[in-house]
Image (cartoon, helix red, strand yellow):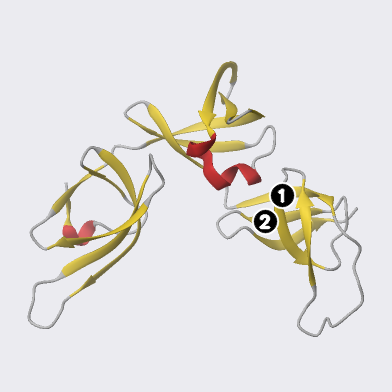
Amino acid sequence: MLDYSQITSQKYIVLNGEPYEVLDSHVFRKQQRKPVNQTKIRNLKTGKVTERSFHQSEKAEEADIETKEIVYIFPKQDELWFHSVGNKGDRFPLNERIVGDKKKFLKEGAGVQALVFNEEIIDIKVPIKVELKVKIAPPSVRGNTAQGGSKVVELETGAEISVPLFINEGDIVRINTETGQYTERVEKK
């Protein structure tokens, strides 16, 4: 059990039988009152983000979340297929709802971490930075580049991101998966 002040960001807790990830927490005291931990939590099954206050007398059960290394294989309709690391025969689908927006950073053969709660995969964690090839890049146009010009390109996974004008089709770029933004060019075509 976690005390109210131990419920901090990046911890997993169980509320009403559901697993939650603590996204943000802030312990404060209003005037003469007792301290309160104001948190922002995300339901790992539904993805819904809510705010909840934990008072000094409250406790929360820490969720028993295991991590498992899995490899992305291919998409099929509204499912994404994976297999266990080292065992290509152990294939299983995950619903697109579980993977969410992270699917735009997954390419075939990419390793990810699966979060397992009660022997059920409830979420995946992709690496913070991934390298993807630029599939479609419009030509750069002359104009006002004093503020740093940018253009939208399509990556090999189908994701569209904003990049600097010097990025061309065939270049490999590094993307921050938490923000979905371009960080640097890794390899020039």
Q: Residue at left 84%, top 68%?
A: 165
Q: Is residue 92 left or right of residue 45?
A: right
Judge by depth and name the residue closer to the eye, 68 or 137.
137
Using the image, determine if residue 64 lies above or below residue 6: above
Image-quadrant location for residue 57:
bottom left
Image-quadrant location for residue 87:
top right
Q: CA distance from mark 1 to mark 2?
A: 6 Å
Helix, strand or loop at mark 1: strand
Q: Is residue 141 left or right of residue 152?
A: right
Q: Residue at left 20%, top 41%?
A: 16
Q: Which mark is residue 175?
A: 2
Judge by depth and name the residue closer to the eye, 146 or 90.
146
Rendering coords of residue 14 (x, y %): 24, 43
Q: Amino acid at mark 1?
A: Glu
Q: Which mark is residue 131?
A: 1
Rendering coords of residue 164 (x, y %): 79, 68
Q: Amino acid at mark 2?
A: Ile
Pointer 2: residues within 10 angstroms few (<14), some, or many (20+)?
many
Image-quadrant location for residue 44:
top left
Mark 2 or mark 1, which is nearer the start of the sequence?
Answer: 1
- Tag 1 and tag 2, C-beta contact below 8 Å: yes
